[in-house]
Image: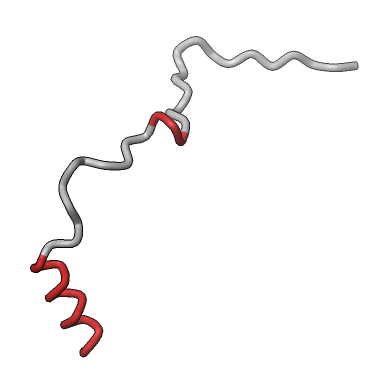
Amino acid sequence: MSETILAAPDIQVPPTQLELPYDDGVSMESARHKAQMDLLIDA
């Protein structure tokens, strides 16, 4: 015997991996970021 499970109509399905933002157009590798990485590595 198989049961059919239906989702409630007021529940939204979360976005898939392809629908999530992955870039905002701002470079993460600026001179400031490099200096911060070097400081953390040396600490």
Residue at 44% x, 32% y is 18
Q: Is residue 33 left or right of residue 14?
A: left
- Give the x, y percent position of residue 31: 9, 68
- Give the x, y percent position of residue 21: 31, 36
Query: In the picture shown, does residue 25 fall above or below 13?
Result: below
Residue at 12% x, 75% y is 35
Foreground residue, 35 or 8?
35
Q: Is residue 32 left or right of residue 12?
A: left
- Give the x, y percent position of residue 19: 40, 29
Image quarter hosting the N terminus? top right
Q: Residue at the bottom extreme?
A: 42
Q: Is residue 11 left or right of residue 23?
A: right
Q: How is the image coloured?
A: secondary structure
| Quarter of the figure with residue 14 | top left
Foreground residue, 14 or 43?
43
Image quarter hosting the C terminus? bottom left
Residue at 21% x, 89% y is 42
Task: Give the mark count.
Answer: 0
Residue at 46% x, 36% y is 17
Q: Residue at the left extreme?
A: 32
Query: In the picture shown, does residue 37 fall above or below 22?
Result: below
| Quarter of the figure with residue 25 | top left
Q: Residue at the top extreme?
A: 9
